[in-house]
Amino acid sequence: MLILDFLKNTLLTSISLLNGASGWLVFSYIVAGLLHDVISPVRFHKALGNKKISSIFKVTLSSMCLPTCSCGTIPLGISLYYSGAYLGPTLAFMASSPVLNPIALVLSIGLLGKELTIINTIAGLLLPFIIGMIGNKLGGNELSKPNLEEEIATISLDESDKVPLIEKFKSGLKWVSEDLAITLSKYVVLGMVFGGFILTAFPDSFIKEYLGDPSMLSLWNVALLGTFMYVCAVGHIPFIAALIASGASPGAAIAFLMAGAATNIPELYSIYKMIGKRTAVIYGVVVTVFALIVGYITNLLLMPGFEPIINYDRIDKSIQGANALIITIPEPVKYICSIIVFIFFLKGIFPKIAGLFNGINRGDDNEQKCC
């Protein structure tokens, strides 16, 4: 009975995670499709297909304007990569967008205080440059999309500019619906199921009690936990505030804040499948270690003597400011988007299931022939 309850809770938690992310996923699919052919691969490659710091700066600056979680950066980041961007700018975009989410920064001022918000903002500005430069340096054969140079060489910029805009939109959306969305949804849904398992096995009460230890070992485990867990860039700010109020060290809170916002299992799994193992390792390790270092420095700066600052006037103002910026997706739309993502997931796994059944049927036929 306990096993059935656990499986039921895991399924419900996975559905809840998918509902929270699906709206941004579908939105990102649409944006990725519109950008895929509207901005030609030649232009993308010219702007972001290099190892210059300026390329990383461009994507970091642009990503700050997007109020998306890490789940929403997956399609956009991978679309950048497949449209001609190098690995460094791609990873910088994926890391900076959720950490520097403008809504989360506004909300954190009221719920976490000025000191932690400043530290988080400075760290959020440094992370994209660090992970971008490391990605460009260690990317190896994953530095760019396979055969990108040959593909770019065959594209005429003049011919691309002559294609009507509506045809570019149609072509990009076709690419998303027949390729990107199917592949990514397959990995995202599987990642959400694993995320549901983690949250069911380690509920909020366990994590809340666990994060109170300010030791280096606790920071390491917190950074690692945040890297693999799925948490919303905005929604987990109140959770972090509750951790601090219950006695968690500021370093543990900031480590969980950064690692949790920047990445999660669905994102790492998608990066692994869509770009490669080396890239997934670079992204996961850099985010974890960076969150650990920032958490450790935060404890050195603010402890001992750190006390949560509860100012209800400031909290009210920050929540009002965040609510003015936030885009609330209605519940019915969330379920519709979840169904859309799940349909893409089914389309992604159907060939493997069909192949499995065909293999079983062939085995049965051979067995009958032998008899």
Image (spheres, rainbow, N blue to C red):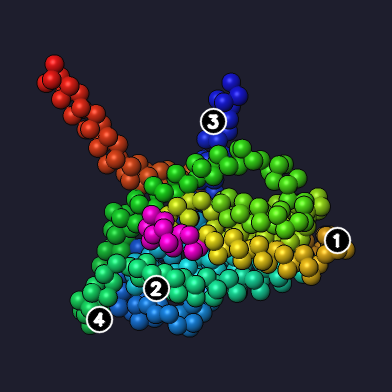
- Pinpoint residue 148: horizontal percent, then vertical percent: 28, 72
Q: Is residue 281 magenta?
A: yes
Q: Label 2: which residue?
A: 86
Of residues 239 and 283, the one nearer the viewer is 283
Give amino acid for label 2.
Tyr
What stretch of residues is rendered in magenta? 272-283
Give amino acid for label 3.
Leu
Give amino acid for label 4.
Leu
Q: Quadrant of the C terminus?
A: top left
Comes first in the chain, label 3 or label 1 = 3
Q: Quadrant of the N terminus?
A: top right
Q: Secondary structure at mark 3?
A: helix
Q: What secondary structure is the magenta-colored segment mainly?
A: helix
Q: Label 1: which residue?
A: 307
* Residue in the image at 52% along x and 59% along y: 284
Q: Secondary structure at mark 4?
A: helix
* Dot 4 crowding, Cα within 10 Å, few <14, some 14–19, many 20+: few
* Dot 2 crowding, Cα within 10 Å, few <14, some 14–19, many 20+: many
Task: Report the mark closest to the observer, 2 or 4.
Answer: 2
Looking at the image, can residue 303 be seen? yes
Q: Label 3: which residue?
A: 7
Q: Are marks 2 and 3 in contact (CB under 8 Å)?
A: no
Q: Label 4: which residue?
A: 157
Comes first in the chain, label 4 or label 3 = 3
Between the C-alphas of marks 2 and 4, the distance is 19 Å
* Dot 3 crowding, Cα within 10 Å, few <14, some 14–19, many 20+: some
Task: Report the mark closest to the observer, 2 or 1.
Answer: 2
Most extreme residue toward the left, as rendered?
A: 369
Most extreme residue toward the top, as rendered?
A: 371
* Residue in the image at 20% along x and 23% along y: 364
Q: Are marks 2 and 1 in contact (CB under 8 Å)?
A: no
